[in-house]
Amino acid sequence: MFTSQTSSFQDSIDVEERDDFDCEDIGAYGQKTQLNCYYTIYLYQGTRSEASGESVAWNQRRADSTTSQEDFSLTLIDSSLPPEAEPELRTYISRRLSKGALLGGMGNIATVELSIPEEAVGCYCCLLEQERSPEQPDADGNGYVICFMGGSEKGLNLYPLHCYVCKKLDKYVQGLHSSLQTPELQNLETEVRPYLSRWYEESVMHIHRVVQLVQSNISFLLHAALSHTQVEVVNSDGRTKADVSRFIKAASLQGLSQQDTTAASLCKAISEDTQSDLVIDCSASPPTLLNTVSNRFCDEWIQAFLNAAERCNPFLLRQILENFKLKAIQDMNSLKRFVRQAEMSHYALFRCCQFLQGCGNGDVLLQNARAEHSDLPEACSIITVLEEFLREQSQAQG
């Protein structure tokens, strides 16, 4: 069974009216601004561990940028923060480490107040531990604390994006692991710093880039994601292909159903039998889309995505995408309930027809319903009747 947290389409699409935001946040989101982003990396040294040559070298070179506690020391390696803001962050991180709030390899996000223009920003922190030596298996581990800061107080730290962003940034930080094995980080300028500097572009901005790429054609991608249609990007660079792939994955409902594996595979098989892959040809600007399919439900979300992209706020775009999925889930739940009722009531079947006609997403809902009820003959016969009803309605309107 799918789960839903949205009560109506208007509640879903109109992000600015949601209770998650207060008036101050709405004003901030309404402005077209380029969000600043920052990074910082620290050397973490457990005081019960034997000091390595690398840590000694860093501590000697950065004596004025080292914070020492009873159980550990924290030394600045590199940061894009203003000089007056970095010591404030180091104090905050030291406090978190003292409380045991940072676990190795698992980042978390909180709001911090720093001497920067944004004042309060979302801050992701992760302790990337080095492997402990066999000689000191119980010693406090050494490693690096990596921090990413960006957005507003309700940007990087905006629930329900909190868990999603943490997961993505955890994966991004792990990609740095091999680069941190170089003695004294001799590759700081050539590898580590460029990688840290790209965190915002690589982990946050991909949805914004896709909306900017296809503009009002975003509805075709939304429909492809819901209907398990394959999307092919041609005549483009690797990043654009990766962005589109990540967008489709983020917009799909795969992983949100108890019968996800079976239903998703069946939906994909149905989709492959009924329509061709969606092709995005980037040989010209704007790109050309081939084999396009959409519906009224997906079309109604176009303006919300365009407005959010114009505001240059990727966190708001992600929130709208989540609302889009939640509304689709709610409609799927409603249809499944109507189908069960229609097995015993002709009136329920009539209500089901009315619902499909009004929601604007009947083709996708019936495709998913047929896949999920494939082993229930009575439900499949009702779905067949509903499919015929939609075809007749489509022909009458055409």
Image (spheres, rainbow, N blue to C red):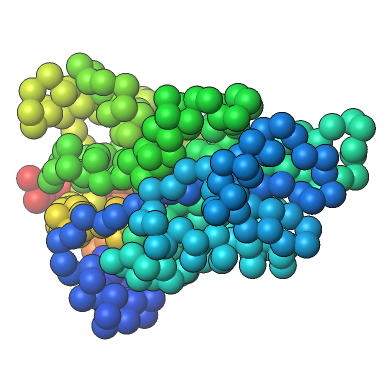
Extreme-top residue of the structure: 235
User: Who is closer to the viewer here, 340 or 361?
Assistant: 361
Percent x, y of residue 49: 82, 44
133 vs 275, left or right, is right
309 vs 203, left or right, is left
Q: Which residue is depicted at the point 47% across and 43% down?
A: 78
User: Who is closer to the viewer here, 344 or 208?
Assistant: 208
Q: Quadrant of residue 102?
A: bottom right
Residue 326 to residue 177: above or below: below
Extreme-bottom residue of the structure: 23
Q: Which residue is depicted at the point 16% across and 47% down?
A: 394
Percent x, y of residue 188: 48, 30
Percent x, y of residue 396: 10, 49
Residue 139 to residue 343: above or below: above
Q: Which residue is depicted at the point 63% across and 25% down?
A: 183
**Image quadrant in which the N terminus is located:** bottom right
